[in-house]
Image: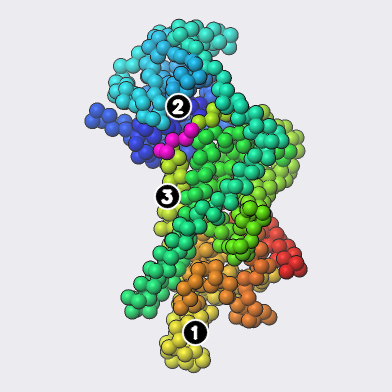
Amino acid sequence: MGSPNGGKTSLFNRLTGLHAKTGNYPGVTVSRTQGLARIAGHDYAIEDLPGTYSLAPISPDEQVVIDVLDGKMAGVWAPDALLVVADATALRRSLLLLAEVLPRHRPTAVVLTMTDELRRRGGSIDVEALSQALGVPVTSVVANRGIGIGELRHLIADWRSWSTPPLDPPSHPEELAGWVDSVLSSAGHQPPTPDTRTERIDRLLLHPVWGTIVFFVVMFLFFQALFTWAAPAQDAVENLFTWLAGLVDEHVPNRLLAGLLGDGILGGVGSVLTFVPQILLMYLLLALLDAVGYMSRAAFLMDKVMSRAGLEGRAFVAMLSSFACAIPGVMATRTIPSSKDRIATMLGVPLATCSARLPVYLLLVGMLVPQSASVGPFTGRGLAMFLLYLLGAVSAMTAAWVVKKITDRSGTLLPFYMEMPPYRIPTLRSVGIAMWEPTKAFLRKAGTIIMGATIIIWALTTFPMRSDAALTAAGVDPTDETAVTAYTMEHSAAAAVGHAVEPVFRPLGFDWRVDVALIGSLAAREVSVSTLGQMASASDPEDDGQVAQKLEKWIYTDGSQVGRKVFTPATEVAFLLFFAYALQCMSTVAIMKRETGGWKWPSIAFGYMFALAWIMAFIGHTVTGWIL
């Protein structure tokens, strides 16, 4: 246990070798991370508690720490021993937390982190003397480089014989301050000098004007990189799946099996996996920004903006988490002390552009904006992606502001605090973990949810199959594979569902095939891309072009617009805006239900976002149609 940004999780990863089990504490959505450390032939279960500055809780996160320490968490054993992680560069604050922990009389040891940074900035501490002054074992580590981990493992193996202080630390504030001064003095503590490098950088990055400009420049370049740097790898993945589909056509004689493998799995899941290079790059850039210490600066800058919406900087942290996935964004609201602020933020964060929207955006932006388009030295597609992410952020803040105005008219704003770590050079290990773990989750989703949904949609678009006689009677040549596939799809179970909801979405320019993709996206947003890719591959199996090129050839097959193109710029804009606002993620709805304790707020969120998505898509379709 320990305060945020103290190196606690890095230490946990070193001890457990990343073999961790993640989940939630029983009854609450606060994350729980457990791992096993094999030491001297024995397995030790190690749990990484949520970060906390004190044992006086003001948020659900901090309340969980108290409940676990006191053995009040149902289904969770109280710990046998505690490792209190103390940042050597902020030792006074860590000792205040330790003074609250020691009166619980559990075997306790202190693990000093950041000792290399303490020395670099001219500070010092005598570890042995600190142990004698506290009356508990103390060891120092540099977790990101593995220094001191061996000694800590030996210490853990001997936890039953850890020394304990003869007296508890005082609880009165003045006496406690004297106790901390006495401990630091006995340990020969020399505080570190201010980090001049960090101070110089912060003069620019925290400036109310220049810092905001830098923030938007960083975000702008972020999205430019997504299209330029990942393009070669994306083309390679696209070519790989095209080659595999060709092998299926060549070596699988059974038409039904070939359709499942080629059109269903490779055409569907392959169209989603094409975007893995860009997703990897996105998480790499986010990991670098977080590891160097910039994300907390972004939260500080946005605190003033969030306050205009009646919220505070923690709400920005939740929204920032939602750029990866709305689920951790919703869960991050537990750090917000005010319940009304939590609800307001929770109903806004799903509008932030999550990585599940990324494949949809990349596909449609690639269709809408020509590759040659540019604004000065910047690509038009990168600019469009930046504007979509900006739209998501502004929409999330606006929605949270509206909800806050409705639910909390007092407008009382609690103080916001967040530690800003010094700028650090990130390690390859930490960045690699931060980049790979969410990408692995995306690949797991592609191999389970998206794969399952793709197979179901393939079946719905393939059955019922017609005999040659039935096809001939319908005027279709049974030897014309493309015509047979088109007729079968037009008269499939999926077509029946798509046609049933078509009146709702026809004003947006969507035909029944797009409607099927929208329905599939309720399982996961990425399913819409796999569905479109699958139907595009099936509609013209001879066309080896990319999914976007095939979709651009789609025409309306019924109604007043028969023969006209489906994916016009107006329809593409409407599709983008619908995905920007709709809550097409049942996992997020389920987490909101658990977080709020009922269906009221998840139902409100789903309903208002669907209505907002339809209205914004209609406006986008109409305005684009007028302009173009």
Amino acid under disc 2: Met
Left or right: residue 90 compared with residue 143: right
Q: Residue furthest front?
A: 377
Position in image of residue 609 (x %, y %): 65, 55
Residue bearing the label numbered 3:
440
Mark 2 burial class by Cα count in 10 Å: few <14, some 14-19, many 20+: many
Q: Are marks 3 and 1 in contact (CB under 8 Å)?
A: no
Q: Residue at x 58, y 8 (%)?
A: 174
Tell me the quadrant of the picture where the C terminus can be found.
Answer: bottom right
What distance separates the C-alpha of mark 3 from that of mark 2? 27 Å
- Looking at the rendering, the stretch of residues picked out in magenta corresponds to 425-429
First of labels 3, 2 by sequence position: 2
Tell me the quadrant of the picture where the N terminus can be found.
Answer: top left
Mark 3 burial class by Cα count in 10 Å: few <14, some 14-19, many 20+: few
Q: Residue at x 65, y 78 (%)?
A: 564
Residue bearing the label numbered 2:
1
Residue bearing the label numbered 1:
483
Position in image of residue 26 (x %, y %): 46, 39
Q: 573 or 196: which is nearer to us?
A: 196
Amino acid under disc 3: Lys
Amino acid under disc 1: Ala
Tell me which secondary structure the magenta stretch mostly adopts: loop
User: Which of the 4 image quarters holds residue 78?
Assistant: top left
Q: Is residue 620 above or below residue 50?
A: below
